Amino acid sequence: MRDLTPKQIVAELDRHIIGQAAAKRAVAIALRNRWRWLKLPADFRREVTPKNIIMIGPTGVGKTEITRRLADLTGAPLIKVEATRFTEVGYVGRDVESMIRELVDAALNLVRRTQRLEVEQQAAQRAEDRLLDLLVPFEEATGPEDAEREERHQRTREKFRQLLKTGALDDRMVEIRVTQRKPQVQVFSNMGVEQMDADLQGMFERLMPRQQKDRELPVKEARQQLIEQETDALLDQDALQETALRLAEESGIIFLDEIDKICGSSEGGHAADVSRQGVQRDLLPIVEGTTVQTRYGPVKTDQILFIAAGAFHSSRPSDLMPELQGRFPIRVELTDLTKDDFLRILTEPSGSLTRQYQELLRVDGIELTFTPDGLQTLADLAWKVNQSTQNIGARRLSTMMERLLETVSFDGPDADPKAILVDARYVNSHLEEITRDDDLSRFIL
């Protein structure tokens, strides 16, 4: 985990997300506390639990993005799940423990990516040697000419090595052996493998036969296949899995979205409330701290950070079970986006929408230029549509940008001229009619 102070974390989040200072501050403190926890004496760590967070706010204001960027900053495994995916134990649907298994899978992917980078150079060298064995085979022989033959073979091999490096042999065909796992039989997919006991599922996957076959491939493709094989051979799978389990336990983040949908709202029906409370009861031990069996081994959930989020239009956090409320001591409210926020979202983040479209269209040689008045008009229209129809926050900008640039995106390869100026006049001419008609806005934007 990176040693970032709360101020540094907020500064990094500010590069990508506009506003929502209170939420950024809360997650920054939670993240720093996790780093502090790792520095505590081992015998005292069990006394300190994560301070889970509930983010309250409408859709599209940055709840998911804050959490995602937080995980990117720290290299922590993150999964996002909707609370509405889960059902009470005993009913058809997903059980809450499945999110822990997904978190371990995410951790495993992170660890595998990191370790693959560490061995990629060695794997590439080994793959190159295997290709040379195929391209320049050496025939053993006995006799006085052995030394001369071997020397001649090495010279030829080095010449081919240089040709390989320059790509001159990319199209030459070679035959290599590839390993493929046979597809699962249909009965397992009908049963819903993810719902099977974790140990039983892992057993079936380990027993799944692997199929080996010889394939003739161009050198360019064969090299990639061989690098994959050598990388897998260099990785210690047991150590990798142990590292992933520890990473999930100590650094894992679960973003539990739509938690307001499982609240027992005073406006809802009694039967619906019973079902929602059943899911809450199942969530409680996971958040409190328990041990979940996964295909790679048991995972303790005590130190996993849970960040819950919801709009809470027709319910309140206090509608959650008291025991579950107590496990989310930090509550932060995210605010609706203003016109100024929309303008800043269009221009300030490192991966802003305007820059995304500029880079995409530049591939076709089109230079897209946004003027200040064009950006202001777009921001004003996005805010107006959100106010007059459903408020979907910053996502409104994505739908409007797609509509605004639909023609130039379609005509891009054949466009003439290749320079497009997006000013207030351009924005109004492409969007004004739609934004003026509430019915059209509702269905198109």
Image: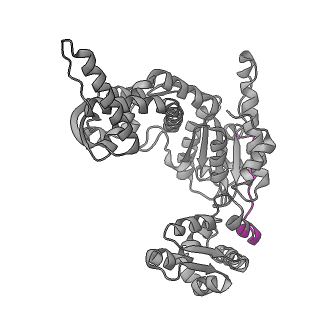
Which quarter shows the C terminus? bottom right
Q: Which colouring convention does the figure follow?
A: one colour
Q: Quadrant of residue 136?
A: top left
Which residue is located at x 20 percent, y 18 percent? 140
Decide if residue 173 is on the left or right side of residue 2: left
Task: Return the x and y of residue 49 as percentages of the image width and height.
Answer: 71, 29
Which quarter shows the N terminus? top right
Look at the image and say whether residue 35 sits in the magenta stretch: no
Q: Nearer the viewer, residue 408 or 345?
A: 408
Decide if residue 209 is on the left or right side of residue 226: left
Task: Return the x and y of residue 423 as percentages of the image width and height.
Answer: 66, 81
Q: Nearer the viewer, residue 372 or 403?
A: 372
Task: Return the x and y of residue 263 as percentages of the image width and height.
Answer: 62, 50
Residue stretch rendered in magenta on the structure: 328-343
Look at the image and say whether residue 336 sits in the magenta stretch: yes
Residue extending furthest left? 142
Q: Quadrant of residue 386?
A: bottom right
Which residue is located at x 67 percent, y 42 percent? 73
Task: Return the x and y of residue 227 as percentages of the image width and height.
Answer: 39, 34
Which residue is located at x 35 percent, y 40 percent? 163
Q: In this picture, is 66 found above or below 386?
A: above
Residue 298: tell me if it is visible. yes
Residue extending furthest top? 143
